[in-house]
Structure formats: C-alpha cells, structure tokens
Amino acid sequence: MRKGAGLQKLIQPRMLLVAAAIFHILFTATVFTVGRLQLAPAHVFPNGIGKSFAIDTLDYEGQCVELARILKTEGLVAWARWPTQLHLRFYSLPFALVSRWMNFNILTIEPVNLLYYLAILVLVFKIGERVFDSRSALIAAGIVAIWPSLLLHSTQLLRDPLLIAAVLLFIWTLVELLQEQLRPGRALWLGVTSIIAIVLIRIVRQPLWYLILATAGVAILLFAVGAWRQRRVSKSAIAFLLLLVAFFIVTPRLQPYFDNQQELRAARTLTHDEVQRMPLVAQIAATRGGFNFYYYYY
C-alpha cells in the first residue's frame, strides 16, 4: 500500500508539471551548450539560436535586444508603443532583466518559453481529460511534451509557442461549453478567456482568423444539436455564445489597434551603388547577406 501510495503521489499532475519544467530547462540548456561549443555549427549559432530550424529568429533577435534597451532607457510606455510583433515584446521582458550582465541567448528568454511550454501541456491535458479521460489526456500530454519539433522550437525566439497556446486555450473554452451546464460566473470567466485567446490569435497569426471562425461555427452547431437532443438549454451557455459571436464581429474592426503589435521592422539593406563603393571583400559579404534576406522573405 505504501509503495502504491508513493507511485500515485509521483504521478500527480503537479509533480509531472514540475518534472516537465525541469526537462524543458535542461533541454534548452543542452541546445545552448551545443551552440556554445559549436558541436553542430551548421545548425546552431553560439547563442543557441537555430540556423536550419529557426530562421525567423535571425531577424527577431535584433528587435528583441532593441525592445529590451527601449524598456530600460525610455520606459514602459515607449516599450508598449514601439512597433513590433507581440511575441517579441514578451520575449524582451526577461532579457531586459539580465541584459546588463548577459548577451542575448536562448537561456535569457527561457522563462517565457517555459511558460508557453507548460501552458501547452496543461491545455492538452485539460482538453483530453474533458473529451476522453485522465489516462488518455496524460498520454497525449506526454507525447506533446517530447515531440521533437515542438520541443526544439519552444527553445527559440519564435511566435509559434504563443500561437499554439492561444489556439489550445480557445479550443478548451469551446470544449468546456459543450461538456457541462455552465453557471453564470463560470460562463463569464470562459467568455473572457475566449476573448483573450481570440485577440492573441488575431494579432499573432491573422491568416488563421477564418479557420478559428469556422471552428467556433462548428462548436455552435454541436451545441445546438446537443441542446436539441437533451431538450434543455443553459442560459449561461447562450450568453457565452452571444458574447463570442459579438466579439467575432467586433474584432476585425479593432484591427487598426492591432497593427502596432504585428509589424516586423526589417533590417536595413544596401543599395547596389552603396555596395559598389565597398572593398571587394565587403561587396561579397553584402551580396551574400542580400541573398539570405531574399530567401527569408520570399
């Protein structure tokens, strides 16, 4: 009995979450070490940024450093108004705290990436638990926790972890809507949570908007079918759906306020005449850099 109780305590969700956090920190430190020691120079920069698997980060890094500088020298208002992508704003926060002592590397942004990683695992578990059962949810979360591409990308300066967490958060609110009779307070809380997820998705990856809209439409249809079969309707759930529909109508009209969170300030490029005035070696380097810039944007 004592042995079984110890095993049961070991597999408690809270303990598993702590284990997942330690695992992610160690994995990020491993990727950083591989870069620092140049064990895979074709794939990882010395600061841990991926060459072959996180090319977006090449442009994001400078902007993150710039945001951290603005936060420290010009204050929170200037930092909030500075035109950049939302995920970079979040990443600049932990780096600003340590930038006096450390150069930018993937360890400096690990607090944000760890938060995204754990949020993804918790939401996968919650959705799986609602739709199936605790065992299936635990297996699903375990698979996601060690999925190679997700794990690797969750160490980088990318918007994907934030987007995945926001989409899962939105799906979770819909699953909760379909699974239970909502009390007014819980319906309001789920509605606010859903709105936050919708805004994040709209800002971080606007092309997903119509897919998210279709997902909400399917959820509303399933809710209507369930209500018709059970011959009862939760007034709180109806209020949640009305709030959701209203916000889907309003959100596109808020786009001008989101633009400042979606801009990508490209690095300055040199004109052909400027390149021609350089020494030969510098010309070659500038031309190579131009090809990299072209490849990235096209």
Image: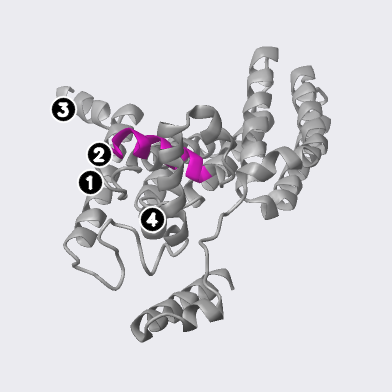
- How far apart are labels 1 and 4 at the CA level? 15 Å
SS category of the residue bearing label 4: loop
Could you give the CA–CA distance between mark 3 and mark 4, rounded to whole angstroms? 31 Å
Specify the color scheme.
one colour
Q: Is residue 270 above or below residue 24?
A: below
Image point 40% across, 46% down: which residue?
65
Find the magenta span and give its range: 87-100
Question: Is residue 125 visible in this depiction of the protein?
Answer: yes
Q: Main secondary structure of the magenta part?
A: helix
**Mark 3 vs 4, N-terminal side:** 3
Q: In terms of image quadrants, where is residue 191?
A: top right
Residue 26 marker: 1
Front of the two marks 1 and 3: 1
Q: Nearer the viewer, mark 3 or mark 4?
A: 4
Q: Earlier in the sequence, mark 2 or mark 4?
A: 2
The disc labelled 4 sits on which kind of residue?
Answer: Trp
Q: Earlier in the sequence, mark 2 or mark 3?
A: 3
